Structure formats: C-alpha cells, structure tokens
Amino acid sequence: MKVVITGGNGQLAHDLKKEVPGEFEVLPLSHQELDITFRDDLLKKLSQIKPDVIINTAAFHKTDLCEEEVEKTFKVNVEGVKNLVDYCGGENCILIHVSTDYVFDGGKIETKEPYNEEDIPNPLNVYGISKLSSEFIVRNYLEKFYIVRIASVFGKAGASGKGGNFVYTILNKAKNGELLKVVNDIWMSPTYTKDAARGIWTLLTEDHPSGIYHMTNAGYCTWYEFAKKIVELSPYNAEIIPVDHTTFPTKAKRPLWSPLTTLSEIRLRSWEEAIEEFVKDI
Ligand SMILES: NC(=O)c1ccc[n+]([C@@H]2O[C@H](COP(=O)([O-])OP(=O)(O)OC[C@H]3O[C@@H](n4cnc5c(N)ncnc54)[C@H](OP(=O)(O)O)[C@@H]3O)[C@@H](O)[C@H]2O)c1
C-alpha cells in the first residue's frame, strides 16, 4: 500500500515515517513539495503518485496567530482538507486526517470526565472551529476515513509549526536555571508522537471502521504537573511555580479542560510512561 504523508517534515510525520510497518510504502511530502492549498497542483501530483492512503498532518496550528490570520487558517485547515477529500473521494483513497482536542469547549470540567469520541464538540477559538469544519468535510464526503484527534503533542522533531514543543521549552529553561511559572488550571492529555504514530498505523493494519479516534496518551494532567514530571526526569534542578491561566493572557480562548479518552480498542500507554521514555531517549 502506498501512503502519502502531507506536512512530511513535521513533528508527527517524523514518527509516522519511523514507525511505519513493513507492508507500507511511505511518501512523505513536505510543505514545499506539496502545498495542500494549491488545488490543481495537488490533484495533479496525487494523480501521478496514486496513493492508497493519505495521512494529513499538514495544518496551520499556531492557535493565537489563527485568531489574527483567520483567512489563512481556513485556507489551510479547511480548504486544504477539502482538496484532499476531493482527491480521495474520486480515487477510493483512504484519508487519515489529524485533528485536535481544541474542538471541545471544556464544559466537562464540571464532572471532570475526559472527552470521548461521542461527545459533542463546541470549539472556542478559530483554530478549533477550522479543525472541526475539516472534520465535518471528511465525515460527510468520504466513506473510508479516519479522524484522529491528538493533543499537547511532543515528539523528537518538535513542531515546525510551533517552533518546538512544551517539553523542549521546559527542558531548555530548566537547563538555563530559569524560574518556571506554569499553568495549573488547564487540564489536557499529552500525546507522544511515537505512540500516536503507532496507533495511526494500527488503524490500517487492523482495518478499523471509519470514524473518529481519540489518540492521546492515557490519563491527564495540568501543564504544571506535566512540567514537574519533565523536570523530575531530567538531570536539572529547577523551581516550578504553579500559576493560573490568567497569568498568561492569550489571544485565543482555550478550553480549561480537554483531556481525551477513547471508546475504541486502540489505547495508548499512560502519559507518564510516554514522557519517561521520551526524556530518556533525547
Ligand atoms: N502540535 C500540537 O500540539 C498539536 C495538538 C493537537 C493537534 N495537532 C494537529 O496535529 C497535526 C500535526 O501536528 P505537528 O505537531 O506534527 O505539527 P508540525 O510539526 O507543525 O507539522 C505540520 C506540518 O504541516 C506543514 N504545513 C503547513 N501548512 C501547509 C500547507 N499549506 N500544505 C502542506 N503542508 C503544510 C508544516 O510545514 P511548514 O512548517 O514548513 O509550514 C509542517 O511541516 C496538525 O494537524 C495539528 O493540527 C497538533
């Protein structure tokens, strides 16, 4: 099976390439090689390659910048996805589309239950609205598709779209002896790209039914708890001060509660195990 990965130089794409099972031929296409917003070029290139599967990791996901650059956000995250959907629909190609916990509004903070795939989304920011729109396009136009929601992603490559990731930021600050102030009233489920990549490949190797799949590491924590764990696992001694989210005002509204869980059989290990392996490996 031939698999094209869009956003081929990105953080998740990096581990999708590393974790690929033997039966797949992978063609990662970088932003430069395939811009998903260039419809004619995209349709031409894909018709030449004739992939059986496309994994779309490409996105504009600087959440605060998305509030200012609404047109660009929708161009990449919605129109770009519609271009891929149009190709896939015409060619019987499976689309795996990566989405986000930011499709939820955080209302489940009342019960402190993580969101599963059957919960109703209600995004709070432009980025979340664009990703939810793309989910609807994928679900409504394609028969064979997977929407994979991940969150608070960390991987060796670091997100090119975000200039690194939270883990690297904390480690760098700890190394430089900087005082760390980290938010302790926003809960989320971290996602190690290595684990999400394995989960994504499992969708194909086990031929799971089309649908939405939550693929974060199991469990949840606040950003402060996550930072504390990262520093504990590191050789550095750094003081971390818990603060609430109002300490760092942001352009985009974010859900205060967005832990994810899954109703599917594909379950990733706990975030604690994942971060332990990650920090050891880097
Ligand atoms: N990172 C997170 O915390 C997080 C959380 C939840 C969900 N997600 C979702 O997970 C997916 C992968 O994230 P990631 O962490 O791997 O991000 P990443 O490292 O920034 O990868 C995204 C890639 O998409 C490329 N790209 C941007 N615009 C494009 C376009 N118009 N056409 C083709 N490629 C384009 C980027 O290239 P350039 O950098 O060269 O523009 C980048 O290589 C995204 O769909 C994101 O929405 C991420």
Image (cartoon, rainbow, N blue to C red):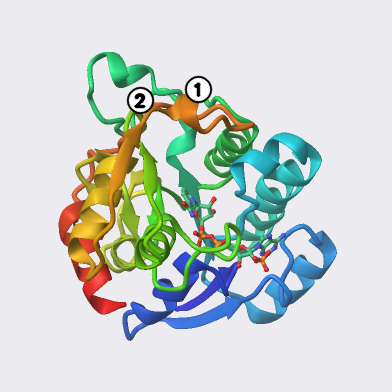
User: Residue at 23% across / 67% down in the picture?
Assistant: 234
Relative height, residue 111 to residue 9 (above, below) = above
Q: Could you say which quadrant of the image residue 56 lies in?
A: bottom right
Residue 99 horizontal side relative to residue 79, left or right:
left
Of circles 1 and 2, the one toward us is: 1
**Looking at the picture, which amino acid does disc 1 mark?**
Asn
Residue 33 horizontal side relative to residue 153, left or right:
right
**Which quarter of the image is occupied by the C terminus?**
bottom left
In this orientation, does residue 188 appear? no
Along the viewing direction, whichever of 220 and 86 lies nearer the viewer: 220
At which x and y percent is residue 119?
A: 35, 25
Q: Categorize mark 1 by other alpha carbons within 10 Å: few (<14), some (14-19), many (20+).
A: some
Q: Could you say which quadrant of the image residue 90 lies in?
A: bottom right
**Which quarter of the image is occupied by the N terminus?**
bottom left
Element carrying mark 1? loop
Along the viewing direction, whichever of 238 and 50 lies nearer the viewer: 238
User: Residue at 65% across / 52% down in the picture?
Assistant: 60
In this orientation, does residue 128 appear? yes
Residue that carries the numbered disc 2 in the rendered image: 119
At which x and y percent is residue 24?
A: 40, 81
Q: For ligand 1, which image quadrant applies?
A: bottom right
Name, please, the residue furthest toward the right: 40
User: Residue at 56% across / 78% down in the picture?
Assistant: 28
At which x and y percent is residue 258?
A: 36, 32
3D distance between C-alphas at marks 1 and 2: 10 Å
**Looking at the picture, which amino acid does disc 2 mark?**
Asp
Residue 121 horizontal side relative to residue 39, left or right:
left
Residue that carries the numbered disc 1 in the rendered image: 122
